Amino acid sequence: MNIKRALCIVLLFLLLFSTVSMAFADDDRSYSITQAFIDLTVESNGLLHVEEQYDYSFDGKFNGVYRDIPLKSGESIDNIQVSAIGAYPVLKQSDDGGYKHLKIYLYSDAAHTKGIRDCDVSVFISYDMKNVVTLFNDVGALQYKLWGEEWDVGVGKITATVKLPGEDENTYYLNPEDYDKSSSLNGDTITAETTSIPKGELYELLVMMPLDDFSDATNAKHVNENGKDMIIKNHEDSINGRNFWNATYLILGLLSVLSPIGAIFTYFKWGREPKVSYDGIYERDLPTDDPPEVINALVENKSNIGTPNMEGFEASIMNLINKKVLKLSTRENSDTMTNDLIIKFNEDENIKVSRSEKIVLKTLSRFAQDSVLNLSELESKLSSESDAKWFMEQYEKWEESVKKKIDLAYYFDDAGSTAISFIAIGGIIFGIIIAVLGFLTNLSNGFYSLVGGIFLIVFSVALLFLDEDIFGRWTENGRVFYLKWNNLRKFLEDNSLINEHPPESIVVWNKYLVYGTALGVADSVYEAMKLQVPNISEYDDSVFMYHHYGGYYMMHHAFSTGQSAANPSSDSGSFGGFGGGSGGGGGGAF
């Protein structure tokens, strides 16, 4: 990382900061939520009835407010009612991505023709939730966020009332305790009042109730295991963990001087790039004949040089298409009124493919039928946990296969990037030890060590996420290799350059699309191709078709779905842990 690059980063940061500041300065409106009232009623049948009141203070012109309520798997919400004092509300609701979205338009007149401006409005929302109360074999439990971390602003205070189905043997917790002002349990009613809660924080209720208080609980979630001890343990572990890390992050400041010094030393010793004779501005032709997955691993994935990422996997698919190992076609889907993207496998054994390409073919063929894969359906197939785990296992085998193709030492010296990892991790470890002593001292300079800790934790974590070639360095051969391929990427990204020097044939365009995918600039190549190739709508080439009909995005979403499905979260094993409750979500004004 040279000095010019460092200065550019600093200037860009300052520019971004000033732009954001000006954007806020130019915004002539603002709002706040002065207080909120949350009333919960737990019915004996397991239904949770929720009533919310939010007192908004608007400065400027607004159209209304919104409320996003997250729903876990199996949970549902109905009987939504909205009213307001100080405005006339109109509710529009929708479902998307596990959320119930409530958009409440507020009007200053009954005819709904004028928006609101410079006023105070109380918005009331009520609804019923099913499968939020959980009945274990030994206890009934409710974990519910009275305030979610997704609100656009904080709240001045919250007053909460929770009505339980019975009066005896109820136990409750409110977290985090930092925001507790007062709370009590009187018979079957919990009342609580908080201090102000800032944006990005949550406030959560955990209550355990006797099973005898529930009858015909068809609206509750039933879990066939004992839950009381698990809930208490998870709750205690969560609170202890929160307290520990709150202290630790501050105390790390005692290493705020050592870590930057170590980083500077590492850069000057290992991070400066060797001088090479190459001084090209851009490359128009492929600099080497390496396969696209290798280029992806060495040039695009700079956070882990030598290891390919999903863009490399897709580039390998497109290369197989370009080599006619795979053939693409489209088929009209009468249900969606769109075209499905179909991949057909070429059974010709004379076509040579590498070991990593064989893994790609094996991975895709698993989801094919009669040597035909509907790529449009791959995402839904990868929502299955077993299929997703198999897919991710094959992807990891593909990664290792590509890595074995690369003699990394020929291209890159990772001594500096390895050293900076040890500096960052070692700084955190030793910082904890030294900072604990500072935290326990009664000397006044303990305050300064805490302030320094905020800087150190950000700095140390940031070091771990920097590109490897900032503190590591390319060899002379690797530096020329990287610069040439990076200059090809610049050429592919710059439509004006392609306009001046368009390729002479479609064959070259196909190479551009394949390697543009590996370099993360496939969209730029595709747009340039549409401008340069005559009769593009009639162009029936499989490589172009893959991108034109959304194959790139289909694979991206399928891969994301596979990652999530391969690592599912437990339905109840973390019940009681801080932040794991139902409800919450957030909202704001528009």
Image (tube, rainbow, N blue to C red):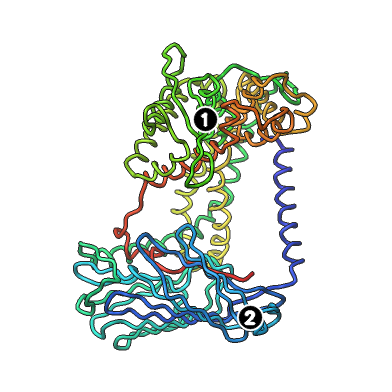
Q: Amino acid at mark 1?
A: Ser
Of all residues shown, which one is farthest toward the front? 334
Q: Nearer the viewer, mark 2 or mark 1?
A: 1
Does residue 515 appear in this view?
Answer: no
Could you tell me residue 507's position as x and y percent?
64, 19
User: Based on the displayed image, in which of its 4 quarters is residue 91 positioned?
Assistant: bottom right
- The answer to whether 504 appears left or right of 391 in the picture is right
Tell me what residue is drawn at x 39 percent, y 61 percent.
72
Q: Label 2, on which residue? A: 57
Front position in the image: 454 or 236: 236
Could you tell me residue 75's position as x and y percent?
37, 65
Q: Are marks 2 and 1 in contact (CB under 8 Å)?
A: no
Q: Earlier in the sequence, mark 2 or mark 1?
A: 2
Q: Secondary structure at mark 1?
A: strand
Q: CA distance from mark 2 to mark 1?
A: 57 Å
Which dot marks residue 47?
none
Q: Label 1, on which residue? A: 329
Front position in the image: 420 or 335: 335
Q: Is residue 245 above or below residue 563?
A: below
Could you tell me residue 209's position as x and y percent?
26, 76
Could you tell me residue 367's position as x and y percent?
38, 34
Q: Is residue 35 above or below residue 336?
A: below
Tell me what residue is drawn at x 48 percent, y 24 percent.
326
Pointer 1: residues within 10 angstroms few (<14), some, or many (20+)?
some
Pointer 2: residues within 10 angstroms few (<14), some, or many (20+)?
some
Q: Amino acid at mark 2?
A: Ser
Front position in the image: 380 or 29: 380
Does residue 377 appear in this view?
Answer: yes
Q: Quadrant of the N terminus?
A: top right
